[in-house]
């Protein structure tokens, strides 16, 4: 399994990420020595997935602190500006804003000078990664208890170590099942347009020697109708206070199919993905990405030049279609009131 420091780490002069745009063909690191470079890495999805974005946001503030003015007030203003830029890089995953806010909150503690602030922010950023991995392992335990031996599962997008900075949310449950010796099998939809399922989830499952089958996004209905899938496990980019869940485009389709075929539909996400300030899914901002991601792939154009495309990166699944939400605290069931569900500490 990929180790957390192989996925994203904070060095003295850089945030270093495993470039997920190059997987599975090659394992290449991308060194971001400025906040602008990190923002670009976030925009192109070199680092992606909600909890990993939270880690990246906090590490971005630590990077910014290195070049911040030497005066406390100047530093505070500069970091607030850099934080706003980082947050704007991707709007849907609330973890990004959360990670930035957690790092900035170090400035509100009793810090003696700029140098101490730099050290505390860096330590907080590294701790956020450790805490996310611990949350993932706890979710894995809670989620694995929902299934018996040799479960047939389906997922969406990539929710593994790559998406979280270590271990995974929905895929963390799969890892926990495998560690228990339950021998899970996972149907992995490709996840067009950027193929996080085919490129990343399949890569992680293959590395872990977990049984899996890649399917087109269009095949999921036919497979669910066969009646063998015992659960759909997805992650989340933002969960509103009422349980409405934004996740990778296509998640809503799976939730509707799951209801029709009477298959349990589980959202697996840490409390850092819960946004108590957003009452329902209607208020979740949905990232719109370039049409070119839909009209082609990997530099090959697949649609006529005159054809336009719409490219919502995420959709919202209403809480009524969610069988349960698995967080590090346990398995929550409807009716959801998540206003008090926050990370410990
Ligand atoms: O656009 P991406 O690849 O960042 O989207 C990622 C997802 O939608 C994941 O399912 C989500 O972040 C949960 S990951 C633990």
Image (cartoon, grey):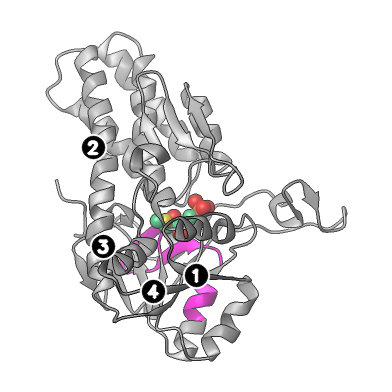
Q: Which residue has dot 4 on it?
A: 184
* Residue 100 in which image quadrant: top left
Say whether residue 244 is visible. yes
- Report the front residue among 338 and 135: 135
Q: Is residue 308 above or below residue 119?
A: below
Relative placement, left or right, of 59 versus 229 is left
Asked whether the residues under the numbered discs 4 and 3 touch, taking CB atoms below 8 Å apart as contact, a structural biologist would say: no
SS at mark 4? loop
Q: Position of residue 170 (x, y in %)?
A: 37, 64
Which dot marks residue 127? 2
Q: Earlier in the sequence, mark 1 or mark 2?
A: 2
Q: Earlier in the sequence, mark 3 or mark 1?
A: 3
Q: Which residues are magenta?
A: 235-256
Which dot marks residue 212? 1
The Cα atoms of the two marked residues, 1 and 4, are separated by 8 Å
Q: Is residue 120 magenta?
A: no
């Amino acid at each position: 399994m990929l180790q957390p420091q192989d996925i994203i780490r904070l060095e003295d002069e850089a945030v270093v990420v495993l470039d997920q745009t190059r997987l599975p063909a090659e394992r290449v690191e991308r060194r971001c020595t400025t906040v602008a470079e990190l923002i670009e890495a976030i925009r192109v999805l070199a680092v992606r997935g909600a909890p990993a974005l939270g880690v990246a946001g906090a590490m971005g503030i630590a990077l910014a602190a290195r070049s911040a003015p030497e005066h406390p007030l100047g530093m505070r203003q500069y970091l607030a500006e850099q934080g706003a830029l980082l947050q704007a890089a991707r709007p849907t995953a609330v973890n990004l804003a959360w990670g930035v806010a957690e790092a900035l909150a170090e400035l509100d503690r009793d810090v003696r000078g700029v140098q101490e602030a730099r050290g505390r922010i860096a330590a907080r950023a590294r701790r956020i990664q450790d805490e996310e991995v611990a949350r993932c392992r706890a979710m894995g335990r809670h989620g694995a208890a929902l299934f018996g031996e040799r479960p047939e599962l389906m997922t969406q997008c990539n929710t593994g170590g790559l998406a979280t900075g270590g271990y995974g949310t929905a895929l963390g449950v799969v890892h926990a099942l495998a560690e228990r010796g339950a021998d899970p099998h996972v149907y992995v939809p490709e996840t067009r347009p950027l193929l996080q399922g085919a490129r990343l989830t399949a890569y992680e499952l293959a590395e872990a020697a977990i049984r899996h089958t890649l399917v087109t996004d269009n095949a999921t209905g036919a497979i669910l109708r066969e009646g063998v899938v015992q659960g759909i496990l997805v992650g989340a980019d933002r969960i509103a206070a009422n349980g409405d869940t934004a996740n990778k485009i296509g998640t809503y389709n799976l939730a509707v199919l799951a209801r029709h075929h009477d298959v349990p539909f589980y959202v697996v996400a840490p409390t850092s993905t819960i946004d108590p300030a957003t009452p329902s899914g209607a208020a979740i901002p949905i990232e719109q990405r370039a049409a070119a991601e839909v009209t082609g792939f990997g530099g090959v154009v697949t649609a006529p030049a005159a054809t336009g495309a719409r490219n919502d990166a995420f959709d919202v699944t209403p809480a009524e279609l969610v069988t349960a939400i698995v967080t590090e605290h346990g398995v929550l069931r409807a009716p959801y009131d998540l206003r008090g569900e926050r990370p410990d500490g």
